[in-house]
Amino acid sequence: MSEFNVRGQQAVVVGGARSGASAARLLIERGASVTLTDLRDTIQEASALARAGVRLVLGSHPVDLFTSADLIVVSPGVPRFHEALVAARERGVPIIGEVELASRWLRGRVIAITGTKGKSTTTALTGKILDHAGCHVLVGGNIGAPLSGQVGESTADSIHVVEVSSFQLETVDTFHPWIAALLNLTADHLDRHASYQEYADAKARIFARQTGEDWAVVNADDPQTLALARRGRARLRQFAPHPAAGVDVTIADGCVVERGAGGDTPLVRTSEVRLIGAHLMADVIAAATITRLAGARPGDITAAVSAFGGLEHAMEWVGEVDGIRYVNDSKATNIDAARQAIDTFDADLVVVMGGRFKGGDFATLRDLLVARRAIVVAIGEARPLIRAALAPAVTVIEAMSMAEAVGAARMAGTRGGTVLLAPACASFDMFEDYAARGRAFKAEVARLRGA
């Protein structure tokens, strides 16, 4: 197959955030004439992009710009059915995403990881294990650097460990992971996807281009992930915390083990894991499964896992003030992720929850919260939805800011208990992203400690 070539083409990049800016620079390097368009009047990288030769069209998405393009590269945050994209599609203009664009020029092999929850932790830990194993590893995608930024470093020996979201998978075509992992699947992003089935179908695209020489890593405890993987042609590798028929990597006798005809191979003792929560242990097992396929030794896995303290904003220990523990799980942006976080703790729990609603049913959390004598501090646009779903069985306190929320949580908390930020919602009503929300939570806890 001839190499993908954009030299001399008119390329339009839609969206000027991190991935869009990276795609624009890559297209310029490859000889395209690039116009980047964004609905915002200003973008952070405007000056740098203009110096690189990118034409900027800000404040609108002109339809004629899209319909006259040779190629459109769309950022994950842009809905597929924007009117300008629909018009371009009708004219036959190719429309791809940034991950698809970058993957066409990668020289190394790709490990792609997706799922409703846990993909960032699994991606980061997979990268660390392979680094311990001496591989040339490049980690990115939906976490860290965009995949477009890795093209220049890609060699035949590289392993690209890529976190991919449903939004990114919507716009892939030739994207071909050597190892593709689907960690779990529950309702999410239903504010963007028309239905749960559409969301699941987007996730399943991670397996679409695999062959019988590739691997599909799936969660044996989640029948949906198995069903989606079996649509493809790759060999299956199953993981689960509990031993069962067909499970290749699991926990036995206090160890994560790889099961085989010759017996179990210990990979890492569970006591070496420093992460909070059973759901994060599942991420460790997934990373061990992936990296064994990529050639990592048990010692590499133990060394990386024992040094891995987790990611910021993912069940992150913030500290203790006046005998109350504070934990930041701002990455819990859907109801199932919040459920897993809440389930980690016992009684005397205060949960800061809310933001921009993404779909699902807050009422499914009611029994879990009642069992823990939990109090909920509701923030953001979802406040009335949370109150309607949980009260009066659960005490719900409404707060208008993160400062007010942490102050209310402190007053409601009990010595020996925990205040948990588990929003179950997107952040965009109050914050730039989940990371800004988590930093705001931590800043308020630091203020309490100082006071």
Image (cartoon, rainbow, N blue to C red):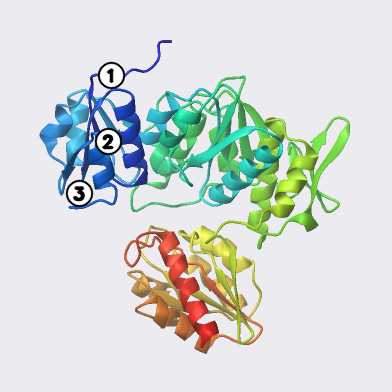
The numbered mark at residue 7 is: 1
Q: Which residue is mark 3?
A: 39
Q: Secondary structure at mark 3?
A: loop
Tell me if I can see residue 298 in this picture.
yes
Q: Identify which residue, 369 or 317, lies in the foreground.
A: 317
Rendered residue at 43%/42% (across/down): 166
Q: Identify which residue, 361 or 212, lies in the foreground.
A: 212
Of callouts 1 and 2, the N-terminal one: 1
Q: What kind of residue is marked 1?
A: Arg
Q: Which residue is mark 2?
A: 52
Q: Secondary structure at mark 1?
A: loop
Q: What kind of residue is marked 2?
A: Ala
The nearer-to-camera label among 2 and 3 is 2
Label 2, label 3: how far apart the Cα atoms are: 21 Å
Of callouts 1 and 3, the N-terminal one: 1
Rendered residue at 58%/63% (across/down): 315
Above or below: residue 109 compared with residue 264: above
Q: Position of residue 140 (x, y in %)?
A: 50, 41
Asked where in the image residue 278 lies, by quadrant, the reply is bottom right
